[in-house]
Image: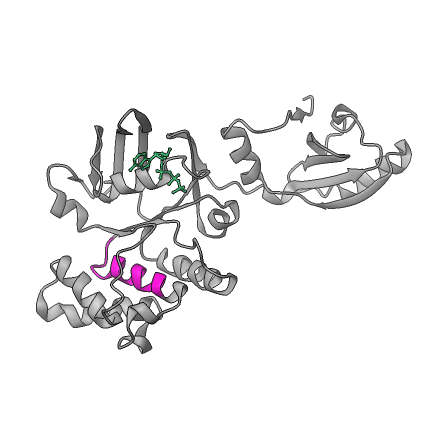
Amino acid sequence: MDNTPLLEATGLVRHYGRHPGVADIDLSVAPGDVVGLLGVNGAGKSTILQLLAGTLAPHAGRIRIAGHDLARAPSRAKRHIGYLAERPALYGELTVDESLDLAARLQQIPRAARLDAVASAKHDTGLADIGRRLVGGLSKGTAQRVGLAQAIVHRPALLLLDEPTSGLDPSQLRGMRELIARLSADHAVILSSHLLAEIQAVATRTVIVAGGRIVLDGPMSDDETRWIEMTCLRAPAPDALTGFTEIQAAEPMGAGRVRLRGAPGTDIRARVVELSVIHNWGLVGLRASGNDLEHRFMTATGQTPARHEARP
Ligand SMILES: Nc1ncnc2c1ncn2[C@@H]1O[C@H](COP(=O)(O)OP(=O)(O)OP(=O)(O)O)[C@@H](O)[C@H]1O
């Protein structure tokens, strides 16, 4: 079996004048990966994706795509990448068909294969019925799908999507999420977002970027459902909660709220209600908490409140 990673980036550095931009970026993507690139605005997500797409040259480091060096053999490397920029190049005066034909030409798809390539990209992005519409007259969500169709017209193995749902209304957003989920069956994907829910909806792996560096790279956690949040009139000290084997961690959130993580396979709600009655905490709320990804994001970017782990 061929174990060549689809993408392998090592030691990438890109600065903007005196501004540091991004540094020490190491990233590897294998077939089947759906990587969520998560970070606040200005963290460096777009810069990383532009470097990987070959639209911005790194000041140091190396990128190999499907075994081809992006700096030395750009055409061969880029053949394997589909890139949807944060503001994709769309020509309002062209029809959807014309836009995709142009994208297919730019990808040097031979004339005989171009019609099929365009039809297939339209089919995959739900644009089959609107080939003759002018791009300038499309809603933001549909125009974004045209951008995505342009990115996949040459059937790349790896999709780089920069904030693909930014600016979409809730129904367009759902459509775009479903589309990305469908495309991820055939393509490896790196998608950036500053929204946790976005990454959670589609990614199998999270890469958190802060201050231009990767501060965390790991699989999505499977223990998200084990967190609950309780609200009390008289919130207990966290270590009053972690003396029980089924409560693994407690985190004060302020304003009477405490976040609790139960042991795998346990439901700690009954225990929490019982303890509240015994100790007169005045429990007024109990709900599934923000998930573990939120916590990992806050920890990786240095914004987390102190957590009290249960003593072994
Ligand atoms: N062309 C540029 N000139 C100067 N500084 C830049 C340029 N592009 C990006 N930067 C700076 O580099 C840093 C990383 O920007 P980048 O756009 O990569 O972040 P981002 O995480 O994608 O943010 P956003 O979600 O707002 O797009 C920011 O501090 C930004 O101000």
239 versus 31 height, above or below: above
Res 212 → quadrant: top left
Q: Residue furthest toward the top? A: 311
Between 134 and 14, the residue placed more toward the observer is 134
Query: Residue at (21%, 28%) from the top-left corner?
Result: 59
Between 136 and 41, the residue placed more toward the observer is 136
Q: Which residues are magenta?
A: 143-156
Q: Position of residue 46 (x, y in %)?
A: 34, 41
Tell me, yes or no, whether the highlighted magenta stretch contains residue 144: yes
Q: Is residue 128 left or right of residue 62?
A: right
Determine if residue 101 is in view: yes
- Report the image quarter containing ligand 1: top left
Quadrant (top left/top right/bottom left/bottom right) for the C terminus = top right
Q: Is residue 100 left or right of residue 170?
A: left
Give the colour scheme of this rendering.
Answer: one colour
Query: Residue at (29%, 68%) from the top-left corner?
Result: 135
Q: Position of residue 238 (x, y in %)?
A: 74, 26
Determine if residue 119 is in view: no
